[in-house]
Image (spheres, grey):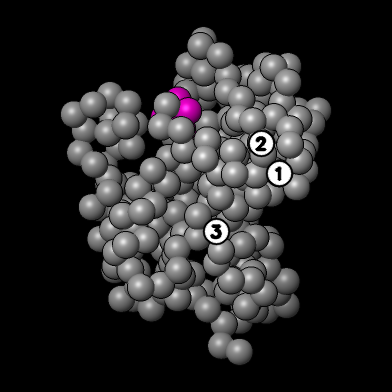
Amino acid sequence: MKEKTAGILGGMGPEATVDLMRRIIAHTDARDDADHVRCIVDNNPKVPSRIKALLEGGGVSPGPCLADMARRLEAWGADFLCMACNTAHNYYGEVRAAVGIPVLNMVELTVRAASELAPGGAAGILASPAVRLTGLYEAPCAALGLTPLYADGPWEQRLLQVIKDVKAGRADEAARAAFAEIAGHVRSRGAAVLIVACTELGIIGARADCPQVDAADVLARTVVDMAKGRTSPH
């Protein structure tokens, strides 16, 4: 079987895109260069701000830019696509409609993995406020019997600041410690499983005493399985 080429819509942010590629490499059983997955990556940090468009109002929609990136990746030879950003999945429909190849849905894949760890339980969603306010995880969770939980008020703003710190290159121990406290807060609200639903947060990792699902890691594993022909898009 001819191995498939992955196309990655990246740059949201750049470090998170590189982190996804590291994970793809780590999840590949390789003995030599040729065993690794071919990835065509558009690491485009010029994608219009998802936060401005979804939360602040007046921003330019990222949808047309993401759709254009998808078309280019398809033209360049990608057999399937993925987006290295949870919030960008608010525009998944536009991306999917722009191409004739499969587009992995990181949100749906992640919720499926979480439901296997905590069937019928509460899932703590660790993400930017845009994920909560747009209800990005609501329908996938409802479909699989999970109840989404989020950080309360000040805790959510603190989490947003951690995300901004990572985007600014400050993925340090202070950011990790703050994220661990926030994860503990969400856990205390009754979460049976935690979902790291922001690719920036995946860079620093959540330290918590319960099962976790990292969206970037789920996506990386699925990219490898797709490329190697071990799975097909749902």
Q: CA distance from mark 3 to mark 1?
A: 25 Å
Spatial separation of the CA atoms under disc 1 and disc 2: 7 Å
To which residue does mark 3 refer?
21
Where disc 1 sits, the SS reads helix
Residue at image location 57% in from the left, 82% down from the top:
3
Give left or right: position of 24 versus 39: right
Q: Are marks 1 and 2 in contact (CB under 8 Å)?
A: yes
Chain part drawn in magenta: 128-132
Write down the residue under mark 1: 115
Task: State whether the magenta stretch is mostly helix, strand or loop.
Answer: helix
Residue name at image x 51 percent, y 11 percent: 153
Q: Quadrant of the C terminus?
A: bottom right
Residue at the top extreme? Answer: 154
**Helix, strand or loop at disc 3?**
helix
**Dot 3 or dot 1, earlier in sequence:** 3
- For label 2, the crowd category at 10 Å Cα-Cα, with few meaning under 14, some 14 to 19 and many 20 or more, is many
